[in-house]
Amino acid sequence: MTKQVNLGYKYRLSPSKEQEQLLSHQMYVYNQAYNICLNLWNKESDKNKKLEKENRKYRSAVSYDTVVKRALRTRKIPIKTVVTQQARINFLKAVKKAFSKEVVTERQKAISDAQTPKEMAKALKLGFPKFHSSKEPHQSFTWNNQGYTILDYTNKFKILKLMSNKIKFRSHRELPSNYKMCSIVISKDSNKYYVSFNIEFQKEIGLVVSSENLDTTKSIGIDLNVENFAVSSPINNLMNNISEVKDNHLILNGSKNRRGLKYAKAVKVLERKQSRRVLKAIKSKTKLGKNHKRTQHKINKLNKSLSNQKNDLYHKISTTLTKEFELIVVEDLKLKNQMTKSAKGNEIVHGKNVRQKSGLNKSLLSASFYQFVAMLQYKQTMLNDKLFVKVNPAYTSQECRKCKHKDKNNRLKQEEFKCVKCGFEIQADIGASLTILDRGLEKVA
């Protein structure tokens, strides 16, 4: 059996200095085109607010393109039509998303919860597109599925022919033989350039898993924690050379090692230097110099390295689990809106334990639960046609797996679980993963 799959393949580019300038210029053009579209849309929205619904007028896509080209050519900025059109396409997608049901609901909730003018102003802008800055270290532009060629170069490298330029990229994995190109994204961080191919292809699927043919012995529940992922089935033999496993159920996610590097003494010295330079520039009303740029480059390089380490580890863990298990169950965590909400409060209601909550928020965000769950979900469902379920996370760490009794006194210590009703004892995170699996199996059934 075959199914259509949509995937992104990302490779590192090796452009020359001239090619870097060309790519950076197109990123600048993309940002300017996007900002012009946003400015036009803002003016159009302000006018329409004063008119009756039947008298409101909206720009067409062609009208946006015309104004963008005219504005950029007036400023004598060389452009590629493909780049400006893709900027307009992505902008209109952002506007459509801003009025989607989910975003509108979230915005309305934020407006109703706002207690100060500052919170209200932030809530009113929630979900709407924002202006792009070309000063940020992360930049990109989108190209469509035409006007490019991929050529063979060596075993390790290939050539991307784009805008009459042959740019070399490291081909660490082959594209599928029957792929169809959807779009190309050229991006850069503080010091490297990348190309991402968004492709469609037909993938062979051996077994489509459903609730009827599910093997429950190949089902697993995962409890996501700051320092480890607790799983309900023994996996010590699966994680060889990937990650350290404790108690045959706890997969370490590398957060301690990354934290040690991020908060090392040498890094703190660099960050203090940056802080002093910024304060001095603000006080003297002068621009930041080359030393600030060099130091920031070092800090960005370290942060990118840590991010790459985490991505690599999460890809290896998620790939191993999705190949082995037919059903994966995780908690439906609301990390952004609930778990990492600031404890600072506002001018009316002051927060409590702000420093402790701030530290916990940093740890939760650094663990990137959403990223790991997204990897599991698309590999489990889209690539392998297996089952993936999200369950309500409420009381998973307080519920007894044996008698289903819920009590906060069941878990008086972080790593220990002992039911006050039936006396059942287990490592707390492993017990939570078993409860998550039980809820997932009930949902599938």
Image (spheres, rainbow, N blue to C red):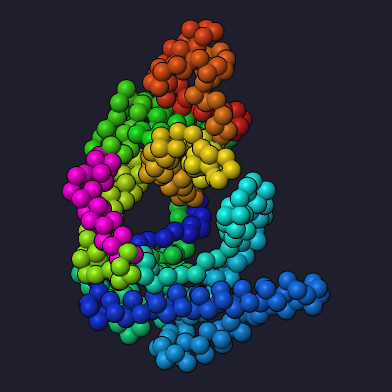
The residue lying at 49 percent from left, 24 percent from top is: 397
Q: In the drawing, does residue 302 fall left or right of residue 420?
A: left
Decide which of 361, 343 is in the foreground and name it. Answer: 343
Residue lying at the far top in this picture: please name it: 422
Decide which of 386, 243 is in the foreground and name it. Answer: 243
In the rendered image, the quadrant that contains the C terminus is top right
Q: Is residue 242 visible?
A: no
The residue lying at 32 percent from left, 81 percent from top is: 22
Q: Is residue 3 above or below residue 413?
A: below
Residue 253's image quarter? top left
Q: Is residue 28 visible?
A: yes
Q: Is residue 394 above or below residue 209?
A: above
Residue 225's image quarter? top left
Q: Is residue 270 magenta?
A: yes
The residue lying at 21 percent from left, 44 percent from top is: 264
Which segment is the magenta one? 257-282
Q: Is residue 334 magenta?
A: no
The residue lying at 54 percent from left, 45 percent from top is: 346
Name the spot of residue 341 as percent of width and height, x first.
51, 42
Name the spot of residue 138 as percent of width and height, x first.
36, 65
